[in-house]
């Protein structure tokens, strides 16, 4: 079994960047997810499915995995560079896509 070291995706409903620099270790599973026919809840017999270890940096996560003999794969998220825009750009005539109601 191997683990995945990655940065979680930022929240889509918030524009702030707080907490976007955290790293997590997740343990993927091959166990089948079963649905409860009465409530519709998903369940699994594998408890490692719900384990997510959080770290402040990638180096801390890699050091933890090496210290505990956990095979790992690092997946890096592409850097997002915000582009400054103004409200007036919504009404530009040279927009790539027309803006209509």
Image: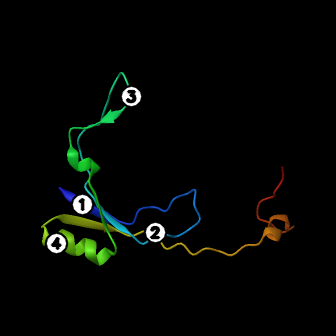
Which numbered circle lies on residue 20? 2
Q: Residue at x 21, y 45 (%)?
A: 47
- The numbered dot on residue 3 is 1
Snapshot quadrant of residue 86: bottom right
Which residue is the extreme one toward the front? Answer: 18
Query: Nearer the N terminus, badge 2 or badge 1?
Result: 1
**Is there a contact, CB below 8 Å, between mark 2 and mark 4?**
no
Q: Which residue is mark 4?
A: 66
To which quarter of the image does residue 97 belong?
bottom right
Residue at horizontal 57%, vertical 61%? 14
Q: In the image, what residue occupies the spot 45% across and 68% down? A: 19
Q: Earlier in the sequence, mark 1 or mark 3?
A: 1
Q: How is the image coloured?
A: rainbow
Closer to the chain start, of discs 2 and 4, is 2
Looking at the image, is mark 2 or mark 4 nearer the viewer?
A: 2
Q: CA distance from mark 4 to mark 1?
A: 11 Å
Place of residue 78 in the rendered image (x, y in percent of width and height, measured from the top left) = 47, 71
Nearer to us of marks 2 and 1 is 2
Q: Is residue 41 above or below residue 58?
A: above
Q: Position of residue 42 (x, y in %)?
A: 34, 35
| Residue 27 shown left or right of residue 99 in the figure | left
Q: Reading the chain from its start, which is encountered first: label 4 or label 1? A: 1
**Dots 1 and 3: beta carbons under 8 Å?**
no
Q: Secondary structure at mark 4?
A: helix
């Amino acid at each position: 079994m191997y683990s995945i070291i990655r940065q979680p995706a930022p929240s889509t409903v918030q524009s702030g960047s707080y907490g976007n620099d955290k790293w997590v270790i997740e343990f993927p599973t091959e166990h089948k997810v079963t649905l409860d026919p009465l409530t519709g809840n998903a369940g699994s017999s594998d408890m490692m499915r719900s384990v997510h270890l959080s770290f402040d940096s990638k180096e801390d996560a890699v050091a933890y995995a090496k210290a505990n003999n956990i095979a790992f794969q690092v997946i890096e998220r592409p850097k997002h560079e915000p582009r400054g825009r103004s409200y007036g750009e919504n009404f530009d005539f040279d927009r790539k896509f027309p803006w209509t109601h």
